[in-house]
């Protein structure tokens, strides 16, 4: 709620920013060091991950791969924060499956059904 444009690498914060209808930029800028010593993935592969693909398929944010694209995307969103607003809303409709305040109960019932508690296996 307190930023003008989120610049991230497909953080789960994209959902929060979409809720606040704030512009999102996913910066996949090349780096030789990846994520560090314990986990290394080429940045170029990140947009192929499932969540990244969903963000990209809805156009909820901009994917940038160079500093020049990043500068242009930030300038564009600062000039027009409503750009891609409709796409952010579409992303939310896709990502937020349970919107009636039932997500915790439905998730708990699903987990119970996996544990063999069949009386809740129907999601109720």
Image (spheres, grey):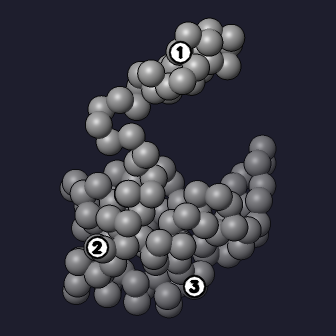
Q: Which quadrant of the figure contains the C terminus? A: top left
Mark 3 and mark 2: span between their CA atoms?
A: 23 Å
Report whether 95 appears left or right of 45: left
Q: Is residue 73 visible?
A: yes
Say if mark 3 contacts mark 2, CB within 8 Å. Answer: no
Judging depth in this view, the residue of 67 and 103 nearest the camera is 103
Q: Is residue 113 above or below residue 21?
A: above
Q: Nearer the viewer, mark 3 or mark 1?
A: 1
Give the image location of residue 25, x and y in percent: 44, 72
Above or below, 32 relative to 98: below
Crowd rating for badge 3 (residues with CA inside 10 Å; few <14, some 14–19, many 20+): few
Question: Whole-percent x and y of residue 123?
Answer: 50, 25
Residue toward you, 40 or 114: 114
Q: Residue at x 60, y 72 (%)?
A: 28
Seen at 56% across and 10% down, the residue is 119
Q: Residue at x 29, y 81 (%)?
A: 83
At which x and y percent is residue 87?
Answer: 37, 73
User: In this figure, which residue is indicated by the disc labeled 1?
Assistant: 120
Rendering quarter of residue 46: bottom right
Q: Is residue 13 visible?
A: no
- Tell me the quarter of the picture where residue 9 sits: bottom right
Residue at the disc numbered 3 = 66
Q: What residue is shown with label 2? A: 85
Between the residue at mark 2 and the residue at mark 1, the CA separation in whole angstroms equals: 38 Å
How packed mark 2 is, by other alpha carbons closer than 10 Å (few <14, some 14-19, many 20 or more), is: some
Q: Earlier in the sequence, mark 3 or mark 1?
A: 3
Tell me the element at label 3: loop
């Amino acid at each position: 709620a307190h930023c003008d444009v989120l610049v991230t690498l497909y953080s789960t914060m994209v959902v929060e920013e979409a809720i606040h209808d704030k512009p999102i930029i996913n910066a996949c800028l090349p780096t030789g060091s990846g994520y560090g010593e314990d986990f290394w993935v080429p940045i170029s592969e990140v947009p192929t991950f499932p969540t990244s693909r969903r963000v990209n398929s809805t156009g909820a944010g901009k994917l940038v791969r160079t500093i020049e694209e990043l500068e242009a995307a930030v300038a564009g969103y600062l000039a027009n924060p409503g750009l891609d607003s409709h796409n952010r809303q579409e992303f939310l409709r896709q990502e937020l499956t349970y919107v009636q305040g039932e997500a915790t109960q439905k998730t708990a019932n699903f987990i119970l059904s996996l544990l063999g508690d069949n009386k809740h296996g129907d999601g109720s």
